[in-house]
Every structure is written in structure tokens, then in C-alpha cells.
Amino acid sequence: MLDGWVRWPEPLAQRYRTEGYWAGRPLDRLLRDRARQAPERIALVDAEGNRWTYAELDLRADRTAAGLRRAGIGSGDRVVVQLPNTDAFVVLFFGLLRAGAVPVLTLPAHRESELVHVAETAGAIALAIPDTLDGFDHRPLARAVRKAVPSVEHVLVAGDPAEFTALADVDAEPVPLPEPDPGDVAVLLLSGGTTGKPKLIPRTHDDYTYNVRASAQVCGLDESTVYLVVLPTAHNFALACPGLLGTLMAGGTVVLSPTPSPDDAFALIEREKVTITAVVPPIALLWLDAVEWEDADLSSLALLQVGGSKLGAEPAARVGPALGCRLQQVFGMAEGLLNYTRLNDPAELVIGTQGRPLSPADEVRVVDEDGHDVAPGETGELLTRGPYTLRGYYRAAEHNARSFTDDGFYRTGDLVRVLPTGHLIVEGRAKDQINRGGDKISAEELENHILAHPAVHDAAVVGMPDATMGERTCAYLVPRGQAPTQRELAAFLTERGVAAYKLPDRVEQTDAFPRTSVGKIDKKTLGRRIAERLRAEGSVGN
Ligand code: OOB
């Protein structure tokens, strides 16, 4: 059991239980139930074509849980999981849940800066990594994390463990284990972040199970579903919206793609007769182009979910004709609230909106800068609370005071307007974050890293428009002497252990920043300035 997180107030929790949103069951049950009902069905397929039935997956999870317990990893222990889209992720995820431990999910792209912070904040006792991935050796990274975060006792490695423990050896005869309280935290997800450091999002067994169940229902998943995991499994979208967990809950088959490239993904769609997958807009654009030259048979694909950043209406309209499937827009967040266009929505809503809230119990408000509700249809900041939206980040009291209203609404930082149908259109952002094709970059976090550079006096990070990614990252610098170039700055940040997707795409120099009337850096002006410059250079395609 975990402390340091904010529970729902009891009357509300009571309501979610009596109204059936919270079923009072541990998250791992979704696998156990299916393994009992249909043990011989195929649950999981990897890129190489290895297959695991529900019974096999269930047994591996039990053996891993027993192995974890034997290693001293158990109830309430946090384990940072950084694994690619492989069976090792799925087995360890369920093994941890069954051992009573809490997976803390990080992206394979994260590096020392992110992992140290996450492990420290979580008070993690273990870290799970691949040996190498895409030419990067994760074992030296694990050594650095262990050195910086002494609570990390164990390093579990998928593949060659060097001096650490091989995940394959985390294995023992299954033992009966106590069931977690469904009201407790099942998993900690990483937030996109708007402050200096990423935050951890507690998701309970009850709330996440509901998230998965309701999402599977909205997407019409059943035993015939074949879901392709294209985005990292650690991402809420691919994991639970309805993702790999929703597919297992429905008794379908999960197929793991190592990358989102059309080469890998299209071949798997054809080979496994994939029916549904989820991507971010830049991947959707890439796929729309790739169908022109790839001759794979995609006819099994019935639904393409697109979310993570805004999909333009033009590519949205091309999805159906080009890929021969339905489109579903998903506007979601690891913090909770999910909006989906529905399978029976008319085309204009599917193409022109980001969907409507998943749950009848989702409460949504749209407010102005003073926190007052705007008139219906006007644009304002989206606030939300509900049966699967967090009430506070883990161990972040100070940040929580700003991120939530007194009555528990989460301030999403997204600017939206609501149509009479209840569908939302995302109009922009009130948070200091760059959404680089679905990858979220906290401006403040990146600025803090840049400010450590000896030749930087001051720094301001803003988004700049980009035809493929939606936005890319521009760092405005007030130099001290000779400013670093984009490449020099990227090398410096990489050396500091910053993930590659956060590296600024462009560096601009200035003598001084424009300021708002209260003396803050005027990022709106900087954003306009770089957008104008790109237009003048003719380098923005839209
Ligand atoms: C998903 O989750 P996160 O936690 O990486 O990012 C959440 C933020 C939202 O607050 C919003 O700013 C942006 O990403 N966003 C979108 C969007 N979907 C997410 N902005 C515009 N249009 C969309 N369709 O990104 C996420 C989690 C679950 C499902 C889907 C996406």
C-alpha cells in the first residue's frame, strides 16, 4: 500500500462504487479471468511471431510475481519499468501487480535526467531495463541511476544482465499472494509535465480498470479484436485506451510492433490481420503517405485511433479513403479524462472534433482566466474530475495546490470549446508545454537544463509550428558571450542525460526577452516571432 497520494473524497468514492464505475477488483484480474475462460486463445504475439496463449501469459505472470517476491520485491514497492514493446513488458507488468508492487512506467527514450528524477520521486527499489535498444546500452544508464538513487537496490535486465539480474531469472513456482485493495494505487504513470520536473500520476486498480473497461466498450472490442501496439506500451494511450489492457480484457489478441514505421507496422497488420491500432498524428501522416508505396494488405484494419496531439481536419478526412478503415479521434491524458469520437458519430464530428468524454460521470467545465464558466460554445480552459481522473500527483503537494481547484477539478491546461453534442474541439493550450507530435516537453524543465550551459545567460523555450509534428521546439537564448549552436546545445543536453525528443529543434539568439506587464517572459510574442520567421523562410508547410 502506498501513501503520499490523494484519494477521492469518500462520498464520491462511494458514489463511483454504488453506480458501478468502480468494480472493486484488482487490475490484474482482467488477465486471470480470460485465462480461466479461454486458456488456449492467443493473448500475445511479438514481432518475431512468438505466440503466448492466455494460460501461458497468466502462468508467466504468476511465476514472475513469485520470483519478485523471492527477490524481496513486494507490497507497495515501486519499480521503475523502462521496457520496449516486448513480451517482457507485459509479463513484468502483470507480475508486479500480482506481487503487490507498483510499476512506474517510463518511456524507452528517457535518459539519466528523467530516470533519476522518477526513481527518486517514486522512492523506487528496482529498475527494469532492456540490455540495449536501438544501439543504446541501458546498463550504464542503470548504473548511473543506482549511484544517484540509493533506494534502487535491484536492476532487472531483459537480455544480457551484465552484473545485474536477468529478468528471465525472476522466476519461481507460483505461490498464493495476498490481493491488493482495489482502492489502492496500481500503477504510477508519467505526466507530460509543465513544471521543472515530470510528475507521477497515481492510478488505482478501481479507476484504471474502469478506464480500460469503458474504453474497450466504446471501441467495440471483443474476442475477435487484434490490437497492434505501435506507441510505447508505457504510454497510457497504448496501454489502456483501450490499448493492450483493453484487448486482453476483451479476450482479443495483442500484437507488439517494435516501431511505428510503416515497414514494421504494415507487415504486422497484414500478417496478424490487425483490426485496431492507436497512433499519434505524425505517424498517421506517415502512414497516409506510405500506403502509396507500400503494398501490404491492410484490409483487416477496421479502426485507427489518433490522439496525443491535434489531428488536422484535412488528414483526418484522408484516413478513411486511404487506409480503408474508420477513424477515431482521442483526446486523452495520463491524468485521466478521455474523450473519444464514437463509432456511430457522423463524419463531421469524427473529422472535426476531438471526441466527447468517455464516462457519464466525467464532469467537465470550461473556464476563463478568472475561473468563471464561459458561455456555452466559447473557448476556455478545460477543468475536469471524474471516476478515473487523478485528484493529485504523487508526492507533489505544492504543485497540486496549483493544478487542482479547491473542489478537486484537475486543470488540464488545454483550451477547448464544447459543441452542443458534448464533443470537444481543442483550440490551444494554456500550459507552458510543447506538444511535439504527441511527445510532451515541459518548457520549464528544458529551460532549467539549458540554463546550466556556461554560455547561456537566459533561456525561453517555445513551440514553433511544424507541418508534420504540429509543433517543434525552439530555444530562445540570451547568450553570455558566444551562444551555443543548436548542435552544440543538443550535445550539451544529451551529456546531461536529457531524452532526445526534448532537444531543441532550433536555437535563436536575442539580446533581451520581451516581457509581459508583470515582468514575465512574453512567450506569446516569442512564439509569434519564430512563426513569422519560419513563414518568411518558407519552411512551414501549412
Ligand atoms: C495523451 O496523454 P499525455 O498525458 O501524453 O498528454 C495529455 C495532453 C493533453 O492534456 C493535451 O494537451 C494533449 O496531450 N492531447 C491532445 C490530444 N490528445 C492529447 N491535444 C489535441 N488533440 C488531441 N487529440 O496524449 C493521451 C492519453 C490517452 C489517450 C490519448 C492521448
Image (cartoon, helix red, strand yellow):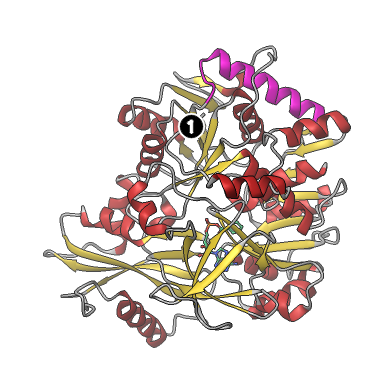
Q: Label 1, on which residue? A: 2
Crowd band around label 1 with a 10 angstrom C-alpha radius: few (<14), some (14–19), many (20+): some
Stretch in magenta:
53-75
Residue that protrudes farthest toward the bottom in the picture:
536
- Measured as percent of width and height from the top left, residue 120 is found at 36, 35
The quarter of the picture where residue 319 lies is bottom right
Of residues 150 and 317, which is closer to you in this image? 150
Q: Is residue 317 left or right of residue 437?
A: right
The quarter of the picture where residue 293 lies is bottom right
Which residue is depicted at the point 60% across and 23% down? 99
Q: Is residue 266 visible?
A: yes
Of residues 100 and 482, which is closer to you in this image? 100
Per the image, label 1 sits on a secondary structure element best described as loop
The quarter of the picture where residue 496 lies is top left
| Principal secondary structure, stretch drawn in magenta | helix
- Measured as percent of width and height from the top left, residue 289 is found at 67, 70
- Measured as percent of width and height from the top left, residue 498 is found at 36, 48
Q: Is residue 231 visible?
A: no
Residue that protrudes farthest toward the front in the picture:
11
